[in-house]
Amino acid sequence: MNGWKTGSRVNTSLASGQGKQGKQGGSSIPCQNCGKACKGEVLRVQNKHFHIKCFVCKVCGVDLAQGGFFVRQGEYICTLDYQRMYGTRCFSCEEFIEGEVVSALGKTYHPRCFVCTVIALPPTLSLSLSLSLSLSLSLSLSLSPPLSFSFSLSISLSL
């Protein structure tokens, strides 16, 4: 599951059970990162629980509790590492692309970077249609002399 995700901070302290679920000593909620029981204030992200200090980027270890992150194959990755590892770069400026893109001839660009390489202006869309039609018809009819008949028609049409 790829994409931008955010977590929410929740308090998992449950009445007198010290983090236990149920009245008969059910299992405590384990931290998804370290495996130890979650007590007090923890983060719940996609129905998984983390100690606040354990919710870190899988690549660089930066704290993810205060910022955005991506999820790739069940791993939580900060935006900088995600872009560095999986992001798409603009063919023109080589910066990472977020949001709208322009794709042409197998290359990807920011809309602002997709410009004519000769005059450095963005392309404009114009459509021109020209149609020409010519028709010529000639008909000659000759009967025994002196009767002769000739007909000619020419039509030219331009749009």
Image (cartoon, helix red, strand yellow):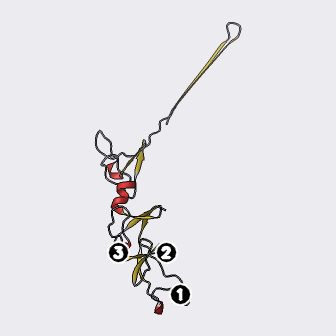
Q: CA distance from mark 1 to mark 3?
A: 26 Å
Instruction: Give amino acid for label 2.
Output: Asn
Query: Percent x, y for residue 140?
Result: 64, 15
Q: Nearer the viewer, residue 143 or 50?
A: 50
Mark 3 and mark 2 in contact (Cβ < 8 Å)?
A: no
Local secondary structure at mark 2: loop
Amino acid type of the residue that numbered disc 1 sits on in the rendered structure: Gly
**Mark number, residue 47:** 2
Question: For the point 67% across and 7% down, which residue is it?
Answer: 146
Horizontally, residue 136 falls left or right of residue 58, namely: right
Q: Residue at x 31, y 52 (%)?
A: 95
Q: Name the mark on residue 53.
A: 3
Residue name at image x 54 percent, y 87 percent: 22
SS category of the residue bearing label 1: loop
The crowd level at tag 2 (other Cα within 10 Å; few <14, some 14-19, many 20+) is few
Circle 2 or circle 1, nearest the eye: 1
Q: Which residue is mark 1?
A: 25
Q: CA distance from mark 2 to mark 1?
A: 21 Å
Q: Is residue 116 above or below residue 5?
A: above
- Up the image or down, 22 lies above or below 56; here it is below
